Image (tube, rainbow, N blue to C red):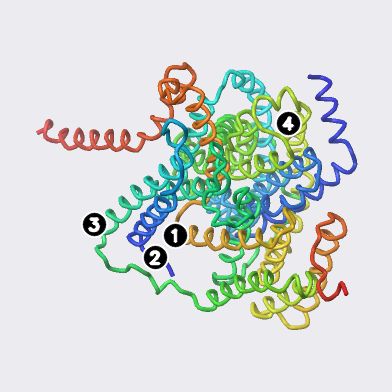
Amino acid sequence: MTGSLAQAISILADPYVLFIIAVASFYGLFIGAIPGLTATMATALLIPLTFFMDPLPALAAIVTMEAMAIFSGDIPATLVRIPGTPSSAAYTQDSYELTKRGHAELALGVDLVFSVIGGLMGAIVLIVAAPLLAEFAMKFTTFEYFWLATLGLSASVMVSRGSLIKGAFSLLFGLALSTVGVDITLGLPRFTFDNVELLNGINFIPAMIGLFGISEVLRNVSGKQLAYPIASVKASKIFTGMWSLMKRYKVNTVRSGIIGTVVGILPGAGADIAAWITYAVAKKFSKEPEKFGRGHIEPLIDAGTANNSALAGAWVPALVFGIPGDSITAIVIGVLFMQGLRPGPMIFERQPEIVYAVYMTFILANLLMIPFGYLAIKFSSSMIRMPRNILMPIILIFSLVGAFAINNTIFDVGVMLVMGIIGYFMETHDIPVAPAILGIVLGPIVEENFMVSMIKTQWDFTQFFSRPISAVLCLMALLVWFFPFIMGFLQRGLQITNQQEPNKVK
Amino acid sequence: MKVSNTLLGIGAMAFGGLIMYLTRGFPSLEGGYPGPALFPRILAALFIFFGGILSFKAIKAHGFSNLVQKSTIYWPGFSNYLCVVGAAIVYMLIADVLGFVLTAILILTLLMIKMGVSILKSALIATGTSVSINLLFGKFLLVPLPWGILGW
């Protein structure tokens, strides 16, 4: 362990890696601060560059970028009432109300400091939980992996906001895409339409760039251009009063850090859902719930801590099981495969330096967030004012080159464009995109583990239920599937009871 | 322009039907066990199932009215949308002939002008960006971006 840790530190201390981390920091801060551009899009656009890096700097760049982008999304939320990323949406109203009352520095200070605390808490959970789970995961065979992936897919639909049916469409679409290419049982080309380029399946990276990059370009250019009136900020004042807030709200911070990390671990639930859940929990336990939504500092502390802690949480299932915790780690899994690494428990034995480097980068990135975040706040008005009519065409060209760069083929550019149009259609019809990505990543895992299990047991289905861990995972999956029915049943029961109560009083 | 949940559901069912149709000739495994068709067919069945539920719920709530909501179209934005899609298609068609740098300059300049940036500013930014991206990907990362007529 000590040797791997030392190796990870020495690699991270390499000037080239530090340079990559610094560039990724500014990139993340920039993208996060621009309303409408998400951290997932930033990751998708970063992949073509990481493709040419060694695994460690590539992962360091992604970890740093996502941490910075999630914090930076708070800046436009506070200054112009538009969340930079969806993760800041839960407390945008409170942040902006504080700004209107002349407390923008306080709001931004809380955003920055509690993002750092949340990020560090998530990193600690990742460092503690991942190796323990990895040891446990060594007992997993194809049966357990089938159920685990199925559970992940089901959870991604359940936790996506909006209609469950539309979440299911998104998931099925992703799974359907994953079936394109040569099948694993007989080597039969499926849905390739005699196109040689489709034999290896739909390339994951152009699909990601399309679903996140191009769809966001389309969404931005097709909406009305808004002029933002931006409040001025004195960056030097942002740290004033933070120590007393940390002491006063220590219970909130610890609670939200834990909830955020746990939500992050759930497949498909990322930083945005963590923020919404902790906002609701904070309101429930607050002594001043009536102040929520009216410029109160408490939701910023709770949700701001949670969204950053969720990021590290999402890496737990990604590293341990190869099951992504959110859409960013879904892309990360694709990157790991491209780099010749197979995420799962074996990575802890075979390439421990990679795992330690991810741990160290989370800590480093969150510590770097203090000076870099300060700079981002100082230059916030210039970033937010970045004209959309210049930025979007540049993102388009970058996406075109990025999609081409993976396999040097124009076909991938076409895949990216089609995915972009589909992603835009999905967004405008309230169909969440995240389950589709999980479908693309987990589809082959579900199918391969199912078919291999079936073939090796000569279609003995009982093996899926008779093995203890497999049975527990199956039960959990069933619970997730029937959760809406159980909740509906309970709610109807409550309604009937409530209707009967007044009659009893009479 | 948005389509209603009724049409979305019908579309999903049609997509499921298409998958079923395309898997009709897939062979089975030895012993007659299901093979390459199994997973796609399960997905197709689920598409049809969920599509049916969505359509049924939408028809029950709204009947067959408002299948397509045209009122949501914002025309300047829609024309920008078409231009971005068109630019990507043009890139695919002419990048090999014209080369990356010239194609990118052309696309960037025209898109920026369309979106309200002045001609001179558009041309300058487009040239700077295209040359920078070419240097980053072409020279630094060794991606074989096409040179086109500049390569002669």
Q: Nearer the viewer, residue A187 or A45?
A: A187
Local packing at callout 2 (Cα closer than 10 Å; few below 14, some 14-19, many 20+) is some
- Circles 3 and 1 on the same subunit: no
Residue A103 seen anywhere in this rendered image of the structure: no
C-alpha gap between disc 2 and disc 4: 45 Å
Residue A337 location in percent, x, y?
A: 68, 39
Question: Label 1 near label 4: C-beta < 8 Å?
Answer: no
Q: Which residue is mark 4?
A: A359
Local packing at callout 1 (Cα closer than 10 Å; few below 14, some 14-19, many 20+) is some
Q: Is residue A64 left or right of residue A427?
A: right
Q: Earlier in the sequence, mark 2 or mark 3?
A: 2
Establish if A279 lies above or below B22: above
| Label disc, if present, on residue A429 of the rendered structure | 1
Q: Nearer the viewer, residue A27 or B9?
A: B9
C-alpha gap between disc 1 and disc 2: 8 Å
Question: Label 2 near label 1: C-beta < 8 Å?
Answer: yes
Q: Nearer the viewer, residue A425 or A123?
A: A425
C-alpha gap between disc 4 and disc 3: 52 Å
| Label disc, if present, on residue B60 of the rendered structure | 3
Q: Which residue is mark 2?
A: B3
Amino acid marked by disc 4: Tyr
Local packing at callout 3 (Cα closer than 10 Å; few below 14, some 14-19, many 20+) is few
Q: Earlier in the sequence, mark 4 or mark 1?
A: 4
Mark 3: secondary structure: helix
Amino acid marked by disc 2: Val
